[in-house]
Image (cartoon, coloured by chain):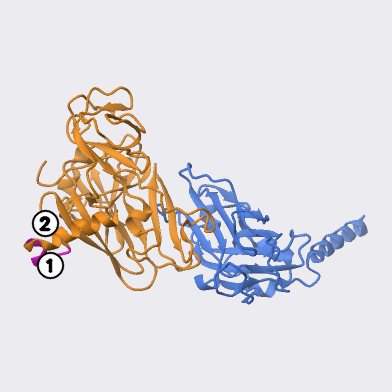
Chain colours: A blue, B orange
């Protein structure tokens, strides 16, 4: 079997005393709708504001993107860390609790909010499938002590994660835990919805001229 | 801790009437050896101390230090670098200081940093430093802690090095791994810093315990402090109190918590913070003008979590009843 690994291990910042963020899909791994391990794509970590209806906007990437407060964005890579195909490990991301993310301060937008992972099989513009998973971990409060200021967000079914878009289902990928995978779903005219919106805006501008 | 040493010590201790009769979790069999069992309750954190030395490799007095190198009165010292060891001074201006050894000969050791205040004639001991495998077993067979394929439901242990806490878990069927590299290299041989401890975060399941057998530590305990989080070993096998163990001179005390070192003690999985207000007495961080907390008990087997203002914190632990 082609051993394509989906793991992103960024350069260690262990010497730093800053709190760190780790996002994990290591139970069942991430699969596309046709059950193939996801090997290239984008994993975005952040949160959705309370009251935003994710399900109602599941096919509207533009609305999702506008609502999403992004903490970190990773492009998945192949064959790092010896992880089985489908596993995603994003680690050693520094957490700045005095920082601003997507124009919102950590304190106002992220602290104590649930950590979501938005997984796409491409970029926001090119993705044809995606999934949004909510971990049981919250972004650390402003006053959390080490090690509780570190954020370990686990998106496995066994960790109690839930699928806001997509699902948990088979197959069990080789080398991973014996649990359901994080399965992506198609975005109807996915990436093109963003393009369509941009095209529409362009037409409006042209008409006004 | 070396399991063979465990077995030999345990056999000797169990043969003594004192050990056979004792029912406490703390069994001080003699001044030099003992057994202590520490609870690791499910779904709670435990500040796990390492209260006993596996053995004492060498002891004597040091000669005049030359930088980080300390001449020793012994001339037959074996290899104390292949596996991690540290030297602890037991008298003099650097009384209690314990530092990792980075090189050695049959009659000298070199430490990773110079020991400030060390002087010719100071008494020393050389002891092994613990590793993850030494405490919990290379195959997690000692407690055992809860282990699964992922971090989701596995117990987690945190070790501290220079103010940074790193998490490890036993990946079922694989071995000890860091939380951030669950498919990375085995971490069994990662050594605890001298006089450091373990922050154990247990998940749901059954209550566990861990038993240590070895030689009791004596005298003041001191190790370099980092700004921020420090896991400090409570090396003693009897209960002590905040006021007795940590005198005002051992911490930075200020008018507020913002200008003080903060000592956290764990009781039943809950951390409570204390600071020495203006060096005058111990107070909780939530009641800075409340009652004195000097009589709060630091149980044997429980470590101390120190949030130090800076690396110049003078922190040390007194041996109760001797200082």
Above or below, B294 relative to A32? above
Q: Are marks 1 and 2 in contact (CB under 8 Å)?
A: no
Secondary element at image label 1: loop
Residue B19 falls within the magenta-colored stretch? yes
Figure quadrant of residue A191: bottom right
Q: CA distance from mark 1 to mark 2?
A: 12 Å
Residue with the mark numbered 2:
B29
Figure quadrant of residue A180: bottom right
Nearer to the camera, A74 or A84? A84
Nearer to the camera, B101 or A87? B101
Above or below, B122 relative to A136? above
Residue drawn at (22%, 31%) of the image = B94
Residue drawn at (70%, 68%) of the image = A130
Figure quadrant of residue B267: bottom left
Residue drawn at (30%, 63%) of the image = B269
**Residue B169 position in % (x across, y down):** 44, 60
Region rendered in magenta: B18-25
Residue A125 falls within the magenta-colored stretch? no
Q: Relative to A143, is A5 on the left or the right?
A: right
Task: Indicate which label's residue lies in the foreground, 1 or 2.
Answer: 2
Q: Relative to B13, is B196 on the left or the right?
A: right
Residue with the mark numbered 1:
B23
């Amino acid at each position: 079997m082609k051993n394509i690994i989906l793991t992103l291990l960024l350069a260690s910042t262990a010497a730093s005393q800053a709190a760190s963020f780790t996002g994990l899909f290591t139970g069942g791994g991430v699969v596309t709708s046709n059950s193939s391990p996801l090997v290239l794509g984008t994993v975005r970590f952040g949160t959705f504001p309370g009251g935003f209806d994710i399900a109602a906007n599941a096919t509207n990437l533009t609305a999702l993107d506008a609502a999403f407060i992004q903490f970190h964005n990773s492009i998945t890579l192949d064959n790092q860390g010896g992880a089985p195909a489908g596993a995603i490990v994003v680690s050693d991301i520094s957490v700045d609790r005095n920082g601003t993310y997507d124009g919102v301060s950590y304190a106002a937008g992220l602290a104590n909010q649930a950590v979501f992972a938005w997984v796409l099989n491409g970029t926001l513009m090119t993705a044809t499938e995606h999934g949004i998973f909510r971990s049981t971990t919250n972004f650390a409060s402003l006053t959390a002590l080490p090690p509780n200021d570190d954020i370990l967000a686990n998106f496995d079914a066994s960790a109690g994660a839930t699928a806001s878009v997509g699902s948990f289902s088979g197959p069990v990928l080789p080398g991973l835990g014996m649990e359901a995978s994080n399965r992506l779903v198609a975005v109807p005219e996915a990436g093109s919805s963003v393009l369509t919106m941009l095209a529409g805006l362009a037409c409006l501008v042209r008409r006004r001229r | 801790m070396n399991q063979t040493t465990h077995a030999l010590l345990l056999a000797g201790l169990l043969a003594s009437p004192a050990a056979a009769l004792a029912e406490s979790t703390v069994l001080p069999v003699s001044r030099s050896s003992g057994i202590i069992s520490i609870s690791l309750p499910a779904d709670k954190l435990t500040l796990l101390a390492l209260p006993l030395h596996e053995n004492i490799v060498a002891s004597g007095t040091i000669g005049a230090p030359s930088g980080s190198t300390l001449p020793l009165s012994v001339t037959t010292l074996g290899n104390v670098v292949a596996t991690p060891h540290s030297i602890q001074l037991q008298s003099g201006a650097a009384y209690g200081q314990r530092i990792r050894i980075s090189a050695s000969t049959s009659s000298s050791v070199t430490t990773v940093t110079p020991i400030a205040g060390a002087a010719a004639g100071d008494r020393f001991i050389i002891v092994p430093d613990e590793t993850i495998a030494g405490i919990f077993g290379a195959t997690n067979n000692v407690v055992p802690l809860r282990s699964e394929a992922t971090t989701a439901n596995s117990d987690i242990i945190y070790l501290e090095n220079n103010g940074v806490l790193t998490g490890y878990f036993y990946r079922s069927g694989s071995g000890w791994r860091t939380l951030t590299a669950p498919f990375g290299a085995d971490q069994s041989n990662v050594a605890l810093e001298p006089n450091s401890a373990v922050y154990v975060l247990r998940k749901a399941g059954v209550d566990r315990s861990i038993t240590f057998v070895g030689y009791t530590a004596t005298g003041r305990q001191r190790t370099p402090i980092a700004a921020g989080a420090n896991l400090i070993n409570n090396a003693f096998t009897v209960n002590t109190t905040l006021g007795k163990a940590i005198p005002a001179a051992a911490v930075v005390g200020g008018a507020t918590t913002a200008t003080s070192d903060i000592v956290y003690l764990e009781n039943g999985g809950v951390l409570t913070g204390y600071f020495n207000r203006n060096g005058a007495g111990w107070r909780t961080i939530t009641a800075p003008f409340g009652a004195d907390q000097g009589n709060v008990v630091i149980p044997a087997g429980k470590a101390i979590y120190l949030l130090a203002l800076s690396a110049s914190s003078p922190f040390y632990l007194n041996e109760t009843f001797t200082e």
